[in-house]
Image (cartoon, rainbow, N blue to C red):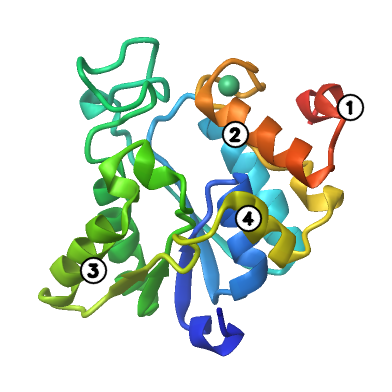
Amino acid sequence: MLEEQAYSSSLLLLSGGVDSSALASICSPAAALFIDYGQRPAPAERRAAAVIGRLLGVSLLEIAIDLRPIGAGLLLDEVSIQNSSSPEWWPYRNQLLVSIAASVALRHGYRDLVVGTVSGDGSRHIDGTVEFYEALNACLQIQEGGITVSVPAISETTEHLVARSGLGEDILGWTVSCHRSELPCGACPGCWKRDRVMNNLGILQGRSEAIEDL
Ligand SMILES: [Zn+2]
């Protein structure tokens, strides 16, 4: 169970998606960080993170670092790396993003990073597994700075996490999950997951057009 006080010195990676937004609500971190690393939906994600951070009362840091020259998968274009485990796989993405976030955390005096990985992520790519984050945390811990990274929702489904967060449509309506573009394409793993979650929770149904207008 998450304890709010445990995250008072934490920096949460906020993508503007459902998982990290729900975790932001539950953790009440000291601040959130949005990273524009060149992903196609970055402008929409950035707007979502800014609005959601404001609605939740979490201050938002932003950084832009162009990782497109070393990217791949749906977040970059329509060409996936051969034999990748999922079409959205961006090699070493989470390792890169956590490293960037750790540097930002050090500069701003935060001790801990929180990432909104959930239980299904590990079946799509190894950098969504418990083993990966344990190794990454150990890698950070042996370096100067002593930053930690935690994934408190990694054993939960998104549905469970969202239900526990108590987030309503006023915030969930702003979340962005598409891997391809600023508007939901309706045909990528990010869009399918968001639709599944909203259907299972019985929220935002019939509001896809409204969401596209955001
Ligand atoms: Zn999509």
Disc 4 or 1, which lies upstream in sequence?
A: 4
Q: Is residue 47 left or right of residue 212?
A: left
Q: Secondary structure at mark 2?
A: helix
Spatial CA distance of label 3 from label 4 is 22 Å
Label 4 amino acid? Ser
Tag 2: Cα neighbours inside 10 Å, few (<14), some, or many (≥20)? some
Please tell me in which quadrant of the rendered image residue 79 appears.
top left
Residue at the spot of label 2: 193
Label 3 amino acid? Asn
Disc 3 or 4, which lies upstream in sequence?
A: 4
Residue at the spot of label 1: 206
The picture places residue 116, in percent across and down from the top left corner, at 49, 57
Is 31 or 197 nearer to us in this picture?
A: 197
Q: Nearer the observer, disc 1 or disc 3?
A: 1
Residue at the spot of label 4: 21
Spatial CA distance of label 4 from label 2 is 15 Å
Q: Is residue 82 left or right of residue 206?
A: left
Is there CB contact under 8 Å for labels 4 and 2? Answer: no
The answer to whether the beta carbon of the residue marked 4 is less than 8 Å from any atom of ligand 1 is: no
Label 2 amino acid? Lys
Spatial CA distance of label 1 from label 2 is 16 Å
